[in-house]
Amino acid sequence: MARVREGEQSALELLFARWEGPLFAFFYRLGCPPSSVEDLTEEVLVSVYRRRHRYDLDRPLAPWLFGVARLVWKDFLRHRGRELAQATPLEVAKELPSPMHDPSELAEIREESEAVRRAIEELPDEQKAAFVLRHYHSLSYEEVAQALQVPLGTVKWRIHEAVRRLETALVDARSEGA
Amino acid sequence: MNCSEVQASLVDLLYEEVAAEGRARLMAHVEGCDQCGERWSHLRVLSAAADRWSPPPLPRGIAERAVARVASERAREASRTCRVSPRIRS
């Protein structure tokens, strides 16, 4: 990031290449419409460049960068309307369990994964953002708090509440499958 | 440590937000308690199920388009600087 600030082109290209994937995955899992996920990702990268002088080089980059993503996301929700932020049908999980599982076990695992995915999509936005940052991007609670600009206790509550809802969805899926 | 204290900490345990000493105490309880052990196992299944949700393949060209936009912004800034400079000198 220091080299990006100095205007080094190769550093900028490296930075963008490093973060396009995580940002794309972030917006995708937040339930942004597939047609907007690419644009939002691109917008964050450009915003990161525009805000490069605001970044404190002594602090970790990920929370700051996802903080920029959060601003872009909020702006998107404000201007494009909630209906656009509703997920369109998304692909079923691609990573299949090991072939060691028998077919009925495999079907059960698929159903559980699908139930959890749907439950993540249905989380309230703020819980979803906190959960996605912690679970999929491995930010600590403290880093999630920095990214979302909320107190640590709030992040902890949001993640606990999100997990509680997902647990309920998983229990429901199991009882329906039984 | 009683069950309600343990239950309140299991999500933090899952997300590695518990210090080593606390982690050892929690795990000792979880291993010896059916109810807490079951919830812990449930949380791990949940975590694994969430892990199986992958985003689609990354479309090509996002970073390249962002780099191009930045280059164009830099060029505009440079051009503004060039236009302003003579006036400043006069």
Image (cartoon, rainbow, N blue to C red):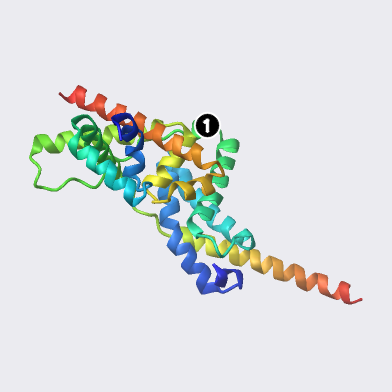
x, y percent for residue A111: 22, 33
Please name whichever residue, A84 or A124, is drawn nearer the observer in this view of the structure.
Answer: A124
According to the picture, the residue beneath numbered tag 1 turns out to be: A82
Q: Quadrant of residue A80?
A: top right
Where in the figure is residue A167, as x and y percent of width and height?
30, 31
In screen coordinates, is A71 left or right of A14? right
Q: Nearer the viewer, residue A90 or A176?
A: A176
Q: Is residue B78 above or below residue A154?
A: below
Q: Secondary structure at mark 1?
A: helix
Quadrant where the C terminus of chain A is found in the figure: top left
Q: Residue at x 53, y 57 (%)?
A: A45
Residue A165 percent across, percent down from the top left: 36, 29
Q: Nearer the viewer, residue A59 or A2?
A: A59
Report the residue at 50% width, 53% height from top: A63
For badge 1, the amino acid type reads: Arg
Residue at figure coordinates x 71%, y 71% from the top left: B78
- Residue A137 appears in the figure: yes
Residue A145, x across and y down, in percent: 51, 45
Up-down relation of residue A160 to residue A47 (above or below): above
